[in-house]
Each structure stands twice: as structure tokens, then as C-alpha cells.
Amino acid sequence: MRMRGTIVGLLLLLLGAGLFAESTPLAGVLEQFKASLQWNPETETGYLDLSGEGLGERGDRIIFSIGSPWMVVNYREKIRTQGVRRSGGTLLFPDKTLEALNRYFELRALRRILPRVAAILIDPGHGGKDSGAIGYHTDKGEELRILEKDVVLEVSKRLYQLLKREYPDKQILLTRNDDTYLKLEERTEIANNIQLRENEAIIFVSVHANAAFNKDAKGYEVWVLPGDYRRTLIDTTTLDEETRPIAPILNVLLEEEYSIESASLAKAVLDSFDNFVGDVTENRGIREESWFVVRKAKMPSILIELGYVTNKEEAHLLGEESYLKKLARGIYTGIRSFVSNFESTRGFTE
Ligand SMILES: [Zn+2]
């Protein structure tokens, strides 16, 4: 008997928790959020306008309807909540609903300050009248002609697809997606036209293939590019009087940061190539000559040399679709590991 009583009591408790979960009446919510409400009685829809003094920012609007668990912020973002109930002459906001709203705005604020890669620009070298490196080979009477512009376009287009699928929220761009000739300034312009917020970065990946008089030379390597593609590092007009004198120092610090990031992106791609094609060709590393260039880098940017079209063995590989697929996967995996590292740790280390 005692036991049965306990169970009934427990059931009542559970039922009670569900039915009489804590809620806050409208007046309390408006006070807490520092918001005002517009109410449409016909559609039973509420428009909560935030002042920015409490929850969210000035101009934010939360829309909800009685009977729906979905709330919409600024006509764009949907949040699942426990909805809003009507009781007596007022509206009741369950605690879970308030929690969901608070959480949404906290995350949004966090997302805005955490560093993120907002755009990845892929630049297939050469194109059109500019073939880039050319490899001619004869193998058992068969002629093989490999053009750098074709190889790099194929790999870049595959890379584009992979990145696009992985990062629907990032801008993934190609400087060219067919056999057209682009001047360096035109490639630059594409990078410069990408709009970035303060905490956002763009990475630049140029794809090339190599040629050498020495027909034995083979393998992949990564160069670190000068970052002339990016806008000014720190615009001194945005600084206050006190900070302006140290702008040159800030610039040096930022330059160093971009250099380190470029090198780590280069390393990530090389490591990834090792996994995908390291068994059939060589890793030539990050070229030592690149280090003088690195000092000028203004955004993480690399130039990848996929291999040598002048090496007979490698030219055959570069002519195979399955090999180009591997190269694209290699770059993709390298970029992915760089991006997840960039976005997960940097914000917390300063
Ligand atoms: Zn090239």
C-alpha cells in the first residue's frame, strides 16, 4: 500500500511538472527582455521588439503565434521553443521558451566575435591563351600532351564542389570555372570584392602545376603567397587617438599572424597530400625561398604545385581522372583541418 501511494505520488508529481511548469506572464517577459509587444488578435500573432537593453540588439524582432512551437527572429531564423500560451487575459511564456530564446541570442553574439573563415577563394592558375606549363611525352608510340591550365581547372572544380558541400554557410568561390584567361588584377579584384566582417577571414588557394628542365623532377609542393589580395590590415582611421600611434605594431603583429596561418595551411595541405598520393610521388615541402615572401602575407594564402607535367610518370598520373580526384580530396582535407583548427581554438587563446 505504501509503495502504491508513493508511485501515485510520483505520477502526480510528474504530471504536475508537465502541466504546471514554471511560466512568466507577458508583463514579466517585457520587463526582463526590455521589449515591447505588438499583438495581432486575428492571427494570434505577437511581435516582440527588442530595445537592446535586455535581450538581443536594438531592432531585433521575435515573431510567435499561439499554438506554434516555432519562433522567428528577424523574419529569418527559426527557433524551436515550447511556444506561448494564452491564459486568462495574458500570455504565458514557459521557462523553456525563455531559455531557448536566451540561448539563441547568446550563441548569436558568440558567433559574431569568434574568428571564422567566411570565404575560400580557389584560383586555378592560367587559362585561355595562357596554357601554363606544358608537358609533351611519347610513350610506346603514343603521344601525351598535358596542359597545366586543364589539370588545375579540373582539380579546382572538384575542390569547389567538395568545399561547397562541406560549408554551405561559407562563400566558396572560383576565380575561373572554364578555360578563360584572367589577368592577375582580375583575380585580385575577386578577392577584394568579398565582404568580410571584423572577425571573418578569407583564405586564398591558388592551384598550379610545375615544369622543369630536369625531367626527373617530380612531386608536390606548396608556396606561401604574398597577400596583396587583401584589403589593408588595419585601417588607421578606424582607430581612436590613443591606439593610432601603435598601428604599425598592430600591423606587424597581424602580418605575423597571417604568416603563421599561411604556413599552417600549407602544412595541412602537404600532410594531406602525403596521405592521398604520397605513395606514388614526392613531397617537396614548403619551399625555403618562400620565407621572405611570407613576411608580406596579409591573409592565409597558399600556392599549390600539384606535380610536374614535365615528368613522364607524373604527367601520366596528372592525365588520370582518378588521380586528379585524389589531389582535390587532398587539398580539401587539408583546408578542412586548417579551418576547424582556426575556428575552434583561436577565439579562446587570446
Ligand atoms: Zn602555374
Image: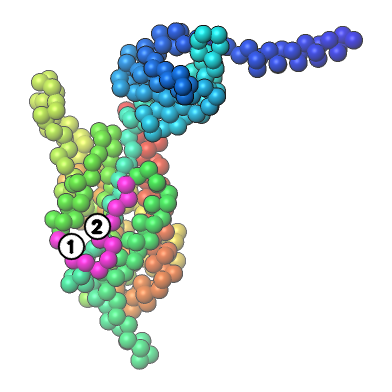
Left or right position of 76 against 297: right
Q: Are marks 2 and 1 in contact (CB under 8 Å)?
A: yes
Disc 1 is placed on an element classified as: loop
Asked whether residue 167 appears in the rendered view, the answer is yes
Left or right position of 131 against 155: left
Residue topped by disc 1:
182
The number of numbered badges drawn on the structure is 2
175 is within the stretch colored magenta: yes
Three-letter residue code for mark 2 = Thr
- Neighbor class of circle 1 (other Cα within 10 Å; few <14, some 14-19, many 20+) is some
Say whether disc 2 or disc 1 marks the residue closer to the N-terminus. Answer: 2
- Furthest residue in direction right, as rendered: 1
Residue in the image at 80% along x and 13% along y: 8
54 is within the stretch colored magenta: no
Depth check: give the residue in front, 265 or 165. 165
- Furthest residue in direction bottom, as rendered: 141
Find residue 119 and name its label.
none
Q: Is residue 233 above or below residue 36?
A: below
Depth check: give the residue in front, 87 or 193. 87
Q: State whether the magenta stretch is mostly helix, strand or loop.
A: loop
Residue topped by disc 2:
175
Question: What is the C-alpha distance between the residues marked 2 and 1?
Answer: 8 Å
Q: Position of residue 150 (x, y in %)?
A: 29, 70
Q: Is residue 137 above or below residue 228?
A: below
Residue range of the region highlighted in magenta in the rendering = 171-183
Residue in the image at 65% along x and 17% along y: 18
Residue in the image at 41% along x and 69% along y: 323
Q: Position of residue 93 (x, y in %)?
A: 51, 15
Q: Quadrant of the C terminus?
A: top left
Disc 2 is placed on an element classified as: loop
